Amino acid sequence: MEFSVKPEPGHAGLTREMFGLDQDGKDTQICVVEERPLTIYLNGQEIVTVMTIRDYPEYLALGYLLNQHMLLPNDHVTGVDYDEDIETIVVRTERKTNYEKKLRKKTLTSGCAQGTVFGDLMEHIDGVELPTEAVLKTSWLFALSRKINTQPSLYLTAGAIHGCVLCEADRPLIYMEDVGRHNAIDKIAGYMLQNSLTSKGKIIYTTGRLTSEMVLKTVQMRIPVLISRSGFTAWGVELAQRTGLTLIGRAKGKRFIALAGQERIRFDSETP
Amino acid sequence: MEFSVKPEPGHAGLTREMFGLDQDGKDTQICVVEERPLTIYLNGQEIVTVMTIRDYPEYLALGYLLNQHMLLPNDHVTGVDYDEDIETIVVRTERKTNYEKKLRKKTLTSGCAQGTVFGDLMEHIDGVELPTEAVLKTSWLFALSRKINTQPSLYLTAGAIHGCVLCEADRPLIYMEDVGRHNAIDKIAGYMLQNSLTSKGKIIYTTGRLTSEMVLKTVQMRIPVLISRSGFTAWGVELAQRTGLTLIGRAKGKRFIALAGQERIRFDSETP
């Protein structure tokens, strides 16, 4: 089973035709991706306003809160109420939450899109152990790149968008897009929580750069392999090395570079 | 005079050689851009931690605070103290500042990199009037694209980086890069403040996407033309139309698309 969630570039409200001029002064028309604010509340508390395409607001809110450690993996979520008109979403939990203090300390990361990490950036990943038995076959990697890059998407339709894909072996499962790649990975985290999907055997593919926060989010989602067709930052690589994440960048066609966790890679493909 | 500030890809500390494996399992080496936290203080108050390459921390801090309206254009800056060891920078002003309340309300934008706008996103630009007499010749645009894209840069050396360039007519003046394009444009704002550069006749060129916040920052810097080789979001376009900014995207070779402020464009180039 592949792409049980995939981009729906034709879905109403995700893109808009806009009219302008081209280089010759001629009228032209272009398909542009939407970008709207969404304010996320946790119980009574306003947490953050993110810019998003708003295709899966529930997954985004849940995944965002989870990846910020404001929602705990065993929290009982009693409701997720999305109100499109006033551009808000409220996540309710049985546990009483109060993140006033946490909200004051924030780090803006170099991620595309939102990318704020509240405070304790490293605190939560130091104890994480990524499975050592997980492997990545190069044949899977090449198959994933091909399947993902040829799948109809908002990126192919309108550009100016990032994607993250949850994969297993050579199969892309959940493909999320957003104006920011952090939203895209948060939506995957929210989907996994809501559908009780485990991280076992999973791989994340992203179209965006491998910066510190993408590495941290992948690690705290307990997923041992992160692949991108884009490049690295040095701190992203350092964090991957420190946490034992397999980090692969510049994956294009049958090429790639692995800068951390190389021991998981099985070279089973013929390369030219 | 062109490129009075330009990227210095060979500068120590901006990139690092890292070692890994390629697709054939062979040892390989790659130049990767640095990404480090920098915590910005305004007087006694911690404002934010941004991820940055840290080449112009003073301009970044000044421009960030200015673009967040925490530093006012006529504030008297009494000191900018950068401490590399503890990764902090303190901007001091004669005026007493207190942004406790402002810091609580934040919007995470779809920009690459930081991109947090504290609260009143729109409030400050509704009164701005961009000069109607400013023009953009297509010959300038094509010359700028060529000069900027062939200038040695961290982007060409290591990738995973964005750039913003302050230009005048067909001349690129100040070329800043960073892991986030918001940092890059903030550094330009800081440079302009510190060097008393006016916005008259200026143009901003960016390598990144034209999202809402890039448009807002350009408008509040009073610069009437924003050009990118990347794409648009619909809200970015709407804001440009509302504020009268000339917004040009997908500028590649001798092609481009203008979606706002087309009346400033002078088509003086032969196109094939």
Image: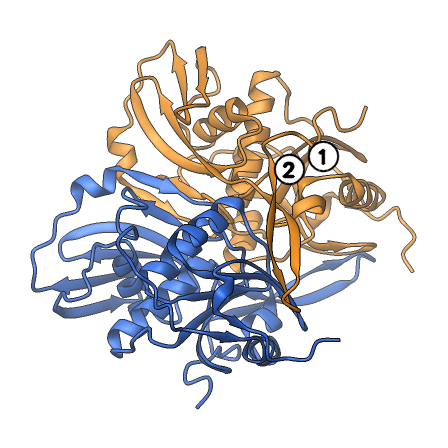
Chain colours: A orange, B blue
- For the point 73% across and 43% down, the residue is A264
Residue A179 shows up from this direction: yes
Type of amino acid under label 1: Ala
Quarter of the view holding residue B51: bottom left
Q: Where is residue B228 in the image (x, y as percent from the top left)?
A: 55, 63
Q: Which of B195 and A172 is in front in this view?
A: B195
- Res. A46 image quadrant: top left
Residue carrying label 2: A224
Q: Is residue B166 above or below residue A87?
A: below
Q: Which chain carries label 1?
A: A
Within 10 Å of disc 2 (Cα), the crowding (few <14, some 14-19, many 20+) is many
Between B179 and B33, the one nearer to me in the picture: B179
Q: Which of B25 and A20 is in front in this view?
A: A20
Q: Residues within 10 Å of mark 1 (few under 14, many from 20)?
A: some
On screen, residue A78 above or below B48 = above
Residues at discs 2 and 1 in contact (Cβ within 8 Å)? yes
Q: Which quadrant, please, contains the N terminus of chain B?
A: bottom left
Q: Which chain carries label 2?
A: A
Give the residue pinned by disc 1: A134
SS at badge 2: loop
* Residue B70 position within the rendered picture, expressed as x and y whole percent measured from the top left: 21, 54
Side (left or right) of B234 relative to A1: left
Measured in 3D between alpha carbons, the distance from the residue under mark 2 to the one under mark 1, in whole angstroms, is 7 Å
Left or right for B163, reference A142: left
Residue found at x 63% / y 29%: A12
Q: Which amino acid does label 2 sit on?
A: Pro
Can residue A121 be seen here? no
